[in-house]
Amino acid sequence: MELDWFEVGARISSQRNKLGLKQQDIYETMSISQNHYSRIENGHVGISIEKLIQLSDILNISIDYILTGKIPRCNKTDFEKKYSELTNKQKKYIDQQIDCLKKFNLR
């Protein structure tokens, strides 16, 4: 399978915009030049594995998604199993806690 670097760059750019980040936020965090990062987003160059891992962490998306556009399938997680066994009142409490956590930009 040959990678379409233009599509890879488009997915990176799209996710960055969804998160409200500027290119500068990314390239400074990754310690690469503005020009190099711009060329990655525009699909003119590829990206090293090391930087790909770093970028997936910054953008909070999987490497699979960045490279292929496919969201990896996963089995029901332990959390999902436990959550499904809760009462409605317990689920509401957990949902409120998750909403609170989302307000904090913890990494």
Image: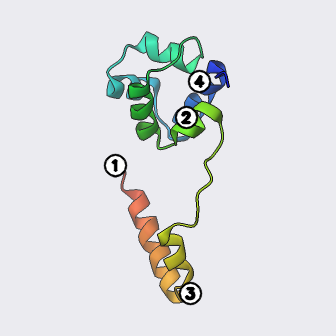
Q: Are marks 3 and 2 in contact (CB under 8 Å)?
A: no
The residue indicated by pointer 1 is 107
The residue indicated by pointer 3 is 88
Closest to the observer, 74 or 24: 74
Which callout, 4 or 3, points at the residue further toward the start of the chain?
4
Q: Residues within 10 Å of mark 2 (few under 14, many from 20)?
A: few
Q: Are marks 3 and 1 in contact (CB under 8 Å)?
A: no
Looking at the picture, does residue 51 appear above or below residue 39?
below
Q: Are marks 1 and 4 in contact (CB under 8 Å)?
A: no
Residue occupying the far front of the picture: 1
Which callout, 3 or 1, points at the residue further toward the start of the chain?
3
In terms of image quadrants, where is residue 5? Answer: top right
Residue 95 percent location from the top left of the image: 49, 73
The residue indicated by pointer 2 is 17
Helix, strand or loop at disc 2? Answer: helix
**Residue type for callout 2:** Asn
Q: Are marks 4 and 2 in contact (CB under 8 Å)?
A: no
Q: What residue sits 46% from the left and 37% below the top?
A: 56
Q: Residues within 10 Å of mark 4 (few under 14, many from 20)?
A: many
User: How far is disc 4 from disc 2 in space, using C-alphas?
Assistant: 12 Å
User: How far is disc 1 from disc 2 in space, using C-alphas?
Assistant: 18 Å
Q: What residue sits 58% from the left and 62% below the top?
A: 75
Nearest to the eye among marks 3 and 2: give it.
3
Q: Residues within 10 Å of mark 3 (few under 14, many from 20)?
A: few
The residue indicated by pointer 4 is 9
Residue 94 percent location from the top left of the image: 46, 76
Residue 24 percent location from the top left of the image: 40, 23
Residue 93 percent location from the top left of the image: 46, 80
Looking at the picture, does residue 36 appear above or below residue 21?
above
Helix, strand or loop at disc 1? Answer: loop
User: How far is disc 3 from disc 1 in space, using C-alphas?
Assistant: 29 Å
Helix, strand or loop at disc 4? Answer: helix
